[in-house]
Amino acid sequence: MATSGEEQQSQAGRHQEVGHKSLLQSDALYQYILETSVYPREPECMKELRELTAKHPWNIMTTSADEGQFLNMLLKLINAKNTMEIGVYTGYSLLATALAIPEDGKILAMDINKENYELGLPVIQKAGVAHKIDFKEGPALPVLDQMIEDGNHHGSFDFIFVDADKDNYINYHKRLIDLVKVGGLIGYDNTLWNGSVVAPPDAPNEEVCEVLQRLCFGA
């Protein structure tokens, strides 16, 4: 029989398999929140996709379950219908969005790796929301530039979620401001980078690397 210490260590490690992205410094507290508030409210299809993604070697890239529920709630509060997602991975946040928007809602989803998206696609199809998704494989910036050049998409998106290459966040933002409607929202994931954004300018490279390593690998 496992001791209480072993059980606590096991529980704390479970969410690290899919990346501990919370600002909470206590693994035990984060696990408590998941077990008592998040997982009981998680739709079965999202649980299935989360567990499927946890087995993927790049599972650190997935949206956490608590963030997925926050996105779902936010989209319902603003009555979002036309949305965009840059950086899809296996589609956990995409599924959260698809479940939140109305039956005739649409999501323009972009990612450079279609193979990862197709891993989660059967779950999305089983949930009955795949028809809401227009997936485009490849870099997002050329697509955004074309949309702006066309002139038919100005202020047309209620909500945009960005969880892709962080180096391009400013480039995405410059374009997305033209595409989101007045009163709409743009959400950016991982903007604080586990505190590395406030590292001193003269911080040694190894110190910054250590911070990012903790973010990426739960070390």
Image (spheres, helix red, strand yellow):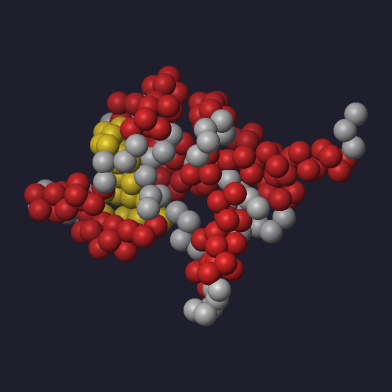
Q: Position of residue 6 (x, y in %)?
A: 84, 39
The image quadrant that residue 121 belongs to is: top left
- Residue 21 is situated, as x and y percent measured from the top left of the image, at 57, 52
> Can residue 80 be seen at all in this image of the molecule?
no
Residue 20 coordinates in the image, percent (x, y): 61, 49
Residue located at (82% from left, 38% from top): 7
Q: Is residue 75 left or right of residue 200?
A: left
Q: Horizontally, is 111 left or right of 43 in the view?
A: left
Residue appearing at x 10%, y 53% in the figure: 149
Seen at 30% across and 26% down, the residue is: 131
- Say how many tags the image has: 0
Q: Nearer the viewer, residue 10 or 153?
A: 10
- 130 versus 202 height, above or below: above
Residue 14: x and y, percent?
A: 68, 38
The one nearer the camera, 39 or 164, is 164
- Residue at the far left: name it: 150
Residue pictured at 46% horizontal, 61% vertical:
191
Q: Is residue 84 visible?
A: yes
Q: Closest to the observer: 184 or 111?
A: 111
Which residue is at the front of the view, 116 or 24?
A: 116
Considering the image in quadrants, where does the N terminus appear? top right
Q: Is residue 121 left or right of residue 52?
A: left
